[in-house]
Image (cartoon, grey):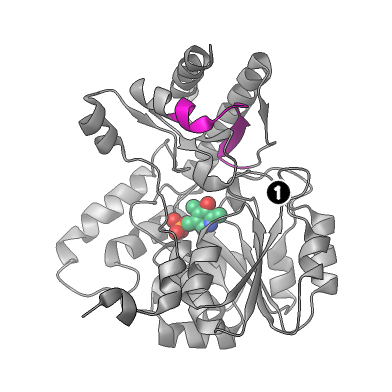
């Protein structure tokens, strides 16, 4: 059998996701021991001690299937945000929720609008559904162009993704632009706000999209336990969606899409606001440190409201990335992010930030 002729042909156009390089891979390939990873916007400050205790306590029960409906977690999220649990969906990361909304809503004659460069999963999951991609370039290098995105809407548009803060730029879409979007977007288009970095944003100009949701607007708002809560390895994200869409997602999703330890951990994480506050403060300090160092080095960067910074090294950043690897510092090269002269670096604590800056200074010299 010629498998490439038997699979769905549109799937062969998908470029596989390129993840950040794992620490062990760099250790193995380059024979290094002391390696730091600032490549995947992980929470390098670690998860809450309460989470670790909850996981240990639940570990003896993993011979049982998890609660496929995530009952307690959905209840807790609903209560925290003041919505009905029927409006909450939980997934194997926001990645899965993006996939689920795409395969639930999109088919070959449908269009999906998103900014470019932005989070690549909108593109991949829309391609899985064989929809038509309508990508709208960022304006002023780093920002969603909401009027241009509105202009691209047609009768066939079903989804419009807003990544806020945007990955890989770390920049926000402000209140006025979201207000404009909510005013102008036609009723047949579902707007999806991907707010994976929501908790890190302190900018007063950041919109509270949940207010629109709670007022009855048919939008989706996605948040995750992977970033500020430090649970990237367990895979759990959540979304607020209209009840009718939640109903469809429950039919489409795998029956046990969120594993037991992830559910237990997410519940414990919600219960430790002090840890979250600490992480947010450490991140803010790290962001200030890195921005200050970039200013000192004369490097341009996108103004970040998240836990990573896109910095322009004004040359092919692949070579810079590789030279940094040899020094045991993993960052994300811009090539696959749509910014070939930039590096995306996750914010760490003072010591690791300083180590990155020292390595970068040597490499650029
Ligand atoms: C990290 C990230 C996600 C994915 O989060 P998971 O919950 O780990 O799948 C979603 N959207 C954006 C913009 C991200 O940066």
Pick the front one: 67 or 133? 133
27 horizontally vs 251: left or right: left
Specify whether residue 318 is painted magenta.
yes
The residue to which callout 1 is attached is: 172
Percent coordinates x, y for residue 324 in the rendering: 42, 24
Pick the front one: 321 or 33? 321
User: Neighbour class for label 1 at 10 Å: few (<14), some, many (≥20)?
Assistant: many
Figure quadrant of the N terminus: bottom left
Rendering quarter of residue 309:
top right
Specify whether residue 328 is painted magenta.
no
Q: How many marks?
A: 1
In the picture shown, does residue 133 fall above or below 354?
below
Percent coordinates x, y for residue 41 in the rendering: 48, 42
54 horizontally vs 194: left or right: left
Pick the front one: 187 or 206? 187
Q: Is residue 146 visible?
A: yes
In the picture shown, does residue 334 fall above or below 223?
above
The magenta segment is: 306-321
């Amino acid at each position: 059998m010629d498998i490439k002729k038997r699979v769905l042909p549109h799937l062969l156009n998908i470029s596989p996701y390129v993840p950040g390089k794992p620490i062990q891979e760099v250790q193995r390939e380059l024979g290094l021991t002391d390696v730091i990873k600032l490549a995947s916007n992980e929470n390098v400050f670690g998860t809450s001690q309460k989470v670790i205790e909850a996981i240990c306590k639940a570990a003896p029960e993993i011979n049982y299937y998890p609660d496929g409906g995530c009952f307690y977690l959905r209840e807790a999220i609903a209560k925290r945000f003041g919505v009905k649990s029927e409006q909450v969906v939980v997934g194997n990361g926001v990645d899965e929720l993006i996939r689920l909304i795409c395969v639930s809503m999109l088919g070959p004659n449908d269009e999906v609008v998103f900014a470019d460069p932005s989070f690549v999963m909108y593109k991949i999951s829309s391609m899985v559904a064989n929809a038509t991609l309508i990508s709208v370039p960022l304006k002023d290098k780093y920002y969603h162009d909401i009027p241009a995105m509105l202009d691209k809407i047609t009768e066939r548009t079903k989804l419009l993704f807003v990544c806020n803060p945007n990955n890989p730029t770390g920049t926000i879409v402000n209140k006025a632009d979201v207000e404009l979007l909510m005013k102008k977007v036609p009723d047949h288009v579902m707007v999806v706000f991907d707010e994976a970095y929501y908790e890190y944003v302190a900018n007063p100009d950041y919109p509270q999209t949940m207010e629109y949701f709670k007022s009855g607007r048919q939008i989706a708002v996605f948040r995750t336990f992977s970033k500020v809560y430090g649970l990237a390895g367990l895979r759990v994200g959540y979304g607020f969606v209209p009840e009718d869409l939640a109903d469809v997602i429950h039919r489409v999703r795998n029956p046990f899409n969120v594993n037991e330890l992830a559910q237990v951990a997410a519940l414990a994480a919600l219960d430790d606001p002090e840890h979250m506050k600490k992480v947010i403060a450490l991140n803010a300090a790290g962001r200030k440190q890195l921005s200050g160092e970039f200013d000192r080095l004369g490097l341009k960067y996108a103004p970040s409201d998240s836990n990573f910074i896109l910095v322009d090294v004004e040359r092919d950043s692949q070579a810079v990335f590789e030279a940094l690897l040899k020094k045991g510092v993993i960052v994300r090269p811009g090539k696959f992010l749509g910014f070939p002269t930039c590096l995306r670096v996750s914010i760490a604590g003072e010591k690791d930030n300083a180590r990155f800056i020292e390595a970068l200074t040597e490499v650029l010299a």
